Image (spheres, rainbow, N blue to C red):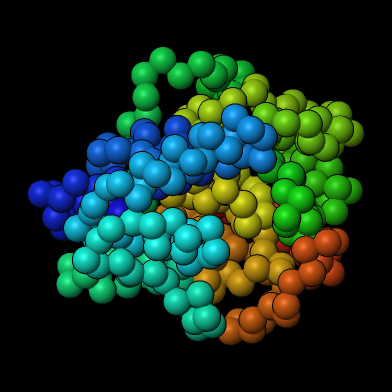
Amino acid sequence: MRALASARPDLRIDWLTEDRHAELVDSLPFVERTWIFPRKGWAHPLGWARMARHLANLAGRRWDAVLDFQANSKSRFQLALTRSEARVSRDSHDLSRRSAVERDADLVRSLGIAVETTAPWKWTLPDGLNYAAMGAEGERPVLLLPDTTAYGRDKAWPDSRWVALAQGLRSQRIPVQFLKPPKNSRAAILAAQADCAITPSTPSLPELAALLDGCRAVVGTDSGPVHLAAYRGTPAVALFGPTDPAVHAPFGPEVQVLSPLSEGEAPPPRDRSRPSPLMEEIQVEAVQAAVVKISG
């Protein structure tokens, strides 16, 4: 979308996203309006009312073109409500192992607009963000991101290895912190076991972006914070097992992906209910070496 805004600065760009991502989209300077899908609490009566208003507003507006990058049932339903002469959706049945960044760029190109995927970009964040500086004065720690979502349990790396990684980096005099998510997580337990710090809370995504900017490097699985850090130029070590790095590798200038898969090998079908055996094949020593190399 940044490439589209650069190629056609005459266009007005609106962006539809879930409520939990809205603050990050709002911070993008090329977005004219953020449309919010009210996912939070939608199953309650007040949530039904918010959802009804959202869908009615969506159906009542007309755009020159609408692009559906998700191509799931939720996005297809909303796409069908919009009024536009050009409605384009990603082919959800396309199993080619192409980068998601290039796949999304092709969606824009289908409108006849020539775009090239742009270099990562540290855009200006909103003023007045309420977050604490990381580490001691002048200290930029390596940030560890051990948490996974309930929908991505198969991405989990064993807890004992997170602790061993933190201890190994500290033995090399590299400061380490664990990321503290807004909700309860096991990060605090791992930080205590490794005898290292945990970050201040970052209740908004712009605050998380600012925190990631202050790191020497981040280490995590295929997750939103790792992708955000990489795109804003923070060195990142990404641990991949059940997801395909050929498609989903973070986009950034200093990214190292560690995967037990051979080059060109695709992962097997996912079982999201439990940790993937592939994650257990990633060894602490390899991750530690990658962090030392990428963080300087």
Number of numbered discs? 0
Residue 292: image x %, image y %?
63, 49
Q: Is residue 109 left or right of residue 255?
A: left
Residue 18: image x %, image y %?
51, 43
| Residue 281 is at least partly visible in this image | no
Residue 280 appears in which quarter of the rendering? Answer: bottom right
**Residue at image x 21%, y 70%?**
111
**Residue at image x 15%, y 50%?**
11
Q: Is residue 192 left or right of residue 210?
A: right
Q: Nearer the viewer, residue 252 or 276?
A: 276
Question: In the rendered view, would you say 215 is above or below 250?
Answer: above
Residue 115 appears in which quarter of the rendering? Answer: bottom left
**Residue at image x 45%, y 76%?**
91
Question: In the rendered view, would you say 6 is above or below 242?
Answer: above
Residue 5: image x %, image y %?
21, 51
Residue 289: image x %, image y %?
68, 56
